[in-house]
Amino acid sequence: MAHRIEIFTIVNDTKSAVMQQRLRARGFMVEAAKVVEVYTINKDFTNHNLQKIAGLLANPITQTCLTDNYTKNTDFDFALEIGFLPGVTDNIATTAKETIEDFFKKKLKNEESIHTSTLIFLKGKLKKEIVEKIAGNLSNPLIQRAHIKSHEEFATEKGMDIIVPKVRLKPPKKISEIDLNISDEELAKLGKEGIPDKYGTRRGPLALSLDYLHTIQKYYKKKKRNPTDIELESLAQTWSEHCKHTIFAAEIDNIKEGLYKGYIKKATEEIRKAKGKNDFCISVFKDNSGGILFDKDWVITDKVETHNSPSALDPFGGSITGIVGVNRDCIGFGKGAKPIINRYGFCVGLPDDEETIYRDQKLKIKALSPKRILEGVIEGVNAGGNQSGIPTPQGFIHFHKDYKGKPLVFAGTIGLIPRKIHNKPGWKKRAKPGDKIVIVGGRTGQDGIHGATFSSEAMTTSSPATAVQIGDPITQKKLSDAIVKEARDKELYNSITDCGAGGISCSVAEMAKESGGCVVELEKMPLKYPNLEPWKIWLSESQERMTLAVPPKKLKEFQKLMEKRGVESTVIGEFTKNKRCIVKYENTTVMDMEMDFLHNGLPKKKLQIFAPQKSLPLTFPSRIVEPSNLTQTLLEILQRPNIASYEFISRQYDHNVQGGVVLQPLQGKGKVNANTSITKPFPDSKKGIILSQGINPAYSFIDTYHMAACAIDTAIRNIIAAGGTLDHLALMDNFCWCSPNEPERLGQLKAATKACYDYATRYGTPYISGKDSMFNDFHGFDEKGKAIKISAPPTLLISSIGVIGDITKAVSLDPKFSGDLIYLIGETKEELGGSEYIAHQNFIGNSVPQVDAELAITIYRQLEKAIDKRFIASALSPAIGGLAVTLAKKAIAGQLGMEIDFGKIPFRKDFFLFSESQSRFIVTIDPKNQKEFEKLFKGLPLQLIGKITNDQNFIIKGIISTNIATLNQHYRKTFSSW
Amino acid sequence: MVKPKVIVITGYGINSEEETAKSFEKAGAAAEIVHINDLIGNPKKINNYQILAFPGGFAYGDDTGSGNALANKIKNNIQNEILKFIAKDRLVIGICNGFQILTNIGLLPGVLMHNNTARLECRWVWLKNTSQKCIWTRDINLIHLPIAHGEGNFYAPPEMLKKMKQHDQIAFKYVNENGSPADRKFPINPNGAMEDIAGICDPTGRIFGMMPHPERFFSFENEDGWELKKEKLIRENKPLPKEGDGLKIFRNAVEYFNS
């Protein structure tokens, strides 16, 4: 029989205090909420042993336990228990199980298990309906169950019930044959809704379009047989937009080779050629991450992924699997890079938007509010990044009302790998015929089935619940350490890759390209619970797994090492050279396909639907009345979510673990969020990795070409401002688009991609890796049941990574000493289209900032020289919010006053102060360097605009007059209670 | 001079082992990173070392309480060897998660509870040395160090605290930059610890646990606000220092065996 242990915290019960606070913040006026940890022990133990177990799980000073008993304390009105649904990852239970097994020196049997849940005793004038609402608010029905008892029920039934959430599946049918001799209408349905089971319900989208299905139909006609379900599912995964990036690969108008090859990849190829022997690219676009040289012995890698769809459904789960997943893109680079820095980026709806939208017409399924989504995604990266011991100094948040239905969650990881390992390139790998296919890390369950095809579909009610997963960072940490800190340098494997979207169906098939084929025996996969159907084993996206090619003679040593590190490793087959992907289940062949058809059989898309960008109905900014009190306007703008301090995020993300961070995410005495960070990976070297990014989705409403140009310029100039150089600087592109089936959206995409080519080649900054996510649309219903579609703004995130030769020359953004001179470098034009200022007035505008790359390069080169000569005491580049916001942030950071005089302003004062013209800097310098500094910028737009003062006043002559404390107070107001 | 040998424990989510080992090396010790399973597999190995270090991290993801699961693993398997080790003239340090592990094993008193802010705090703090006995904090008055923890709120029942004071076990307290008491005020005291306690030692002064991370301040550029110090030194035409103050703590351990 199963047992229950309840653990009560009696000293400093923070969890209960936080719960009460959270419920009150969400409008539930509870008087008290007592949180109790519950362990359900699904194994027979004597009460004596049960008490011993409780002793292992609770702290003797601060906690007390009940074993198979219930509290007689009557000071509550309702008891609410939230636990996991069967099959959902329960990390604490896993640890508890290991502790119990270690203590009794006896493994739990298959049918025995441990589970955790949270019991909350609520006190207050509450009705059951309200408690049900609380339950709905605290739990996610996709992954959790909630159980409510009133005080009376609790007393008469002697506490809560013992619930053992074990997955029980019937023995599977090994294989189904799918008849493809069906009408086009039936085919289309098959593609859209998936393979029908015997009851007629469908498995979920294959996301195969009709032309793809016709190709498959033809292939099997020639084979004179029908495909198996696994074959069809496998093709759907491999040919998905997520895996093959069909839109970026498609011929589009005059671009025969497609947007990716014709613009992005081409830019990199041309830049590398032009750089000649100064080319620093090592491995670009072909591996899980991109790799560039750090110094002569080391390669640094970078990759940014998105996890948008899962984060909309379960923000915490979506973002933790996002960050932990992209860590594997690092571990899966070359022979395995060590993750050393994490990046994050969250684009969400307006934090105060409380208007409910629904996924279904019956208005039963609410979409999560932007606030809930933001809270969840922040927490996910917190758990994933912190527990993995990878610093997270770099990131941003961005808000726009149109991210409400589909948030964008970016997660990136920088890695470090020796250029050579035992005299062979560390960044190269190749599975050899005869190598064993070995899966390491977590076990396989139903998690994330159809994740790859899911992200190729817009979000609707039928979005599958199994797309939601929970990360287990510690299982991955053990795996990561065992691989990159031990097995790699012992040369125990020939190749490694991540099990990401599509699970082993993608990872094994991808690696099989290196050797020339594979044979997999699916029944050997270690499963979370028995009886999982073969197609699900093949497609499962369970987290924390990697696939390796281990030569037979190293297998024993490899598996022994993994065992000693507490990492499960299993041989599931062999890489071959017979040009076929063969999958078996209990000796039955369930898949047998030519590698060539699997990878290259998909028909190339031809998108001849380019329509010139429609000009939007814009309002000219001249209709905006110039505010009479610009001090007040500045204070308001400082509170806008896109500008306000998000110190609360930087503080909860460990950014100094590994001891390398040099330019921190919060800078100056006043702790202002910086957009650039520097990390020194080796304690005894002066070289550093410098990171930043640029993102300007608001400009997309006017012109995506200039939007992209601005994102690129921002990502680059942030690096220059902090001490980086154009000579050693690379970029990554993340396109998050919407409705790519609409010609206008495609037109916007093409324009943005063209800018990516134009500007990268001008700056000489190659792309080293990228990712696109094409279907960021929400289809749902408003409160009246009216169908609505919310498309995320066409978004391009440009991430930048560079190397700085001497980190002691790093420049932070805070002014250092009074008396220092303040300069504005660069041209300020009347460019307010898409600006934060115009948005504040509820307009979009039309004159979007444009980038003059030639002028910018000249400025950047001179600033590089000035920084090298140590002339620059502080620097910050104006971005959204323009000059006024940049000056204010600098003043807050330095906690020193400023006296600014712009002299004659060429156009309207408010437009001048808030224009978002690109390629500009505000720097402060020691007056003794004035002459030499000015000489460097001779003939370039440079203006001495004021000086740092000893007082706390912030004065822009004739326009703005306030003080640092007031600026600071407004800058921190918006997220002060987060 | 013989370099004292340090065993730096890793595994199961410990994540600061490399910078901890590096800091010991810079301070003049010979450090070796050893997986806990390798030590459990060969418990006598511990006798090869003079210093035992439990670095920071997230052992078992803090599941079942921070430091608890790894402490259970140690108690279940190598309790005796550890007790024999500390009975000799040896040193032990636990940093952050390592401190939590030491209290859960029972080598140090008290408990580290959730921060009052109920979330991980990553920031720099000032500490004042308040013990004459602690080997690890010798010759340090004030020190600036980073923290990054979610459960650093030190607590001991009154009787226990009284005993700790009697034995001069309170080694570090959170203070203002000028050395005045934090009086549990956030963020000077970043977690709400009773009496602003940031680090403690055992009655011998040899076993030491602290929440802040000295191993993350091994070079000048690690320090929060170093950019301002740098600018000042440059204007004064002075050279930039190389080392960070965090090394002082590791150097104290090395000197203990060399004096």
Image: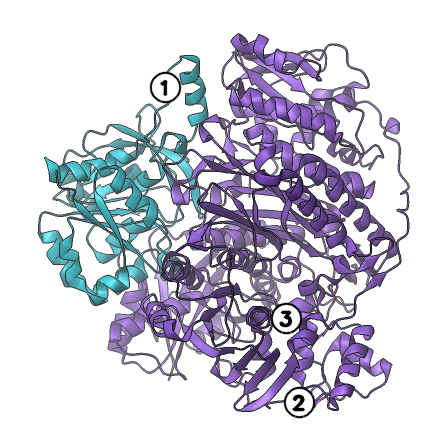
Chain colours: A purple, B cyan
Which residue does the image show at 38% across and 56% down from the upper left? A485
Question: Is label 2 or label 3 in front?
Answer: 2
Image check: B119 left or right of A746? left
Above/below status of A428 relative to B219? below
- Label 2, label 1: how many angstroms apart (C-alpha)? 75 Å
Q: Quadrant of residue A884?
A: top right
Which residue does the image show at 25% across and 52% down from the upper left? B103
Q: Chain of mark 3?
A: A
Query: Foreground: A345 or B187?
Result: A345
Which residue does the image show at 60% across and 64% down from the upper left? A136
The residue tagged 1 is B239
Residue A225 locus on image (x, y percent):
73, 90
Q: Chain of mark 2?
A: A
Residue A282 locus on image (x, y percent):
55, 49
Secondary element at tag 3: helix
Report how many numbered discs are placed on residues in the image.
3
The residue tagged 3 is A465
Question: Is label 2 or label 1 in front?
Answer: 1
- Label 3, label 1: how many angstroms apart (C-alpha)? 60 Å
Q: Are marks 2 and 1 on the same chain?
A: no
Image check: B9 left or right of B146? left
The residue tagged 2 is A176
- Label 2, label 3: how many angstroms apart (C-alpha)? 23 Å
Type of amino acid under label 3:
Ala
Secondary element at tag 2: loop
Image check: A87 left or right of A759? left
Task: Report crowding for label 2: few under 14, some 14 to 19, many 20 or more residues within 10 A (C-alpha).
Answer: some
Image check: A567 left or right of A241? left
Task: Report crowding for label 1: few under 14, some 14 to 19, many 20 or more residues within 10 A (C-alpha).
Answer: few
